[in-house]
Amino acid sequence: MTVQTELENIAPSKLSVGGVSKRFRTKRAEVHALDRVSLEVAEGEFVCLVGPSGCGKSTLLNIIAGLDSADEGSVSADGQPIRGPGRDRMVMFQEHALFPWLDVLGNVMFGLKLKPGLNNKEREEVAKYYLHLVDLDSFLHANIHELSGGMKQRVALARALAPNPKVLLMDEPFAALDALTREQLYGDIQRIWEQRKKTIVFVTHNVREAVCLGDRVALFSPHPGRIRQEFAIDLPRPRDINSVGLATRSSEIMKALKGYIGSTETEVAE
Ligand SMILES: Nc1ncnc2c1ncn2[C@@H]1O[C@H](COP(=O)(O)OP(=O)(O)OP(=O)(O)O)[C@@H](O)[C@H]1O
């Protein structure tokens, strides 16, 4: 395999979630995290899962990632049942989970370790391509602890993209960042998604963030976790989170969400 073939866009996956239920049993209680959740995500689609804390968004993402399994129902990528993690589905979490003993380049190269057919020099070339994509060319040899929160998440994004997955699964990746840094990353992730043609499932409790990024927003409610409604977002891209159109659409969705969870719920940000 050459670096050039490795960097080519590959066809994104279609995801299919059918009637998935999941319960967690602890010593004291049983939590019904997901109740017959179904979701279809088309090839290259950007879908956001929105809802208050505890409604099962991360559980569903973990099941699609193959990090957890459903009690009932089916989950498949391109028609193949998902039975465990795979390089075709990379996950990015709120916490960057970078290795502090490796520099920026080393962290992204680490994700390519198991990539067959690439030698070290080629892995470095691939890693540099993705670090350029996230605007970190000048920080290849920086230590992780020297970076800002936003830069760490850029490294984490480059690391998730480097194995050229068909699906990117993102669990509140920007939640711990300040508003300005988040806004920059909204622009970046939209640009990268269009350039690299990934299927993206993005978990957030921020309705505006979901409307800014998603082709579609799936609304969850908790106890038990269910998808209550889906909204197609046809605003032109790239979207500005501060635009009037986006605020209007967010308010409509927020209103629907409050109808499902009650207006006293405070964990969802508009
Ligand atoms: N490993 C686990 N053991 C026991 N309960 C769990 C486990 N993982 C999740 N849960 C419970 O399942 C429910 C759904 O959790 P989940 O993390 O999927 O929700 P979420 O919508 O992603 O919430 P948040 O936005 O807070 O991450 C919650 O009540 C949670 O406490």
Image (cartoon, rainbow, N blue to C red):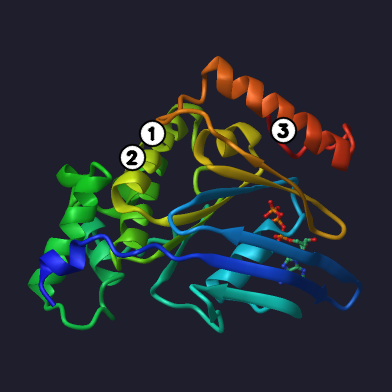
The residue that appears at 77% across and 55% down in the rendered structure is 54
Q: Earlier in the sequence, mark 1 or mark 3?
A: 1
Q: In which quarter of the image is residue 31?
A: bottom right
Q: Do the residues labelled 1 and 2 touch (CB within 8 Å)?
A: yes
In the rendering, at what x and y percent does residue 222 appear? Answer: 83, 53
Picture mark count:
3
The residue where tag 1 is placed is 187
Q: What residue type is labelled 1?
A: Gly
Residue 156 position (above or below residue 174): below
Q: How crowded is mark 2: few (under 14 residues within 10 Å), some or many (20 or more)?
A: some
Q: Is mark 2 within 8 Å of ligand 1?
A: no
Residue linked to disc 3? 253
Task: Name which residue lies at 64% across and 37% down.
Answer: 206
Please state which amino acid type lies under the numbered disc 2: Arg
The 10 Å Cα crowd at callout 3, few under 14, some 14 to 19, many 20 or more, is many
Viewer-side residue, 230 vs 222: 230
Which amino acid lies under the numbered mark 3 shown in the image of this protein? Answer: Ile
Kindly identify which residue carries mark 2. 191
Ligand 1 under 8 Å from disc 1 Cβ: no
Label 2 residue SS: helix
Rendered position, 136 above or below 117: above
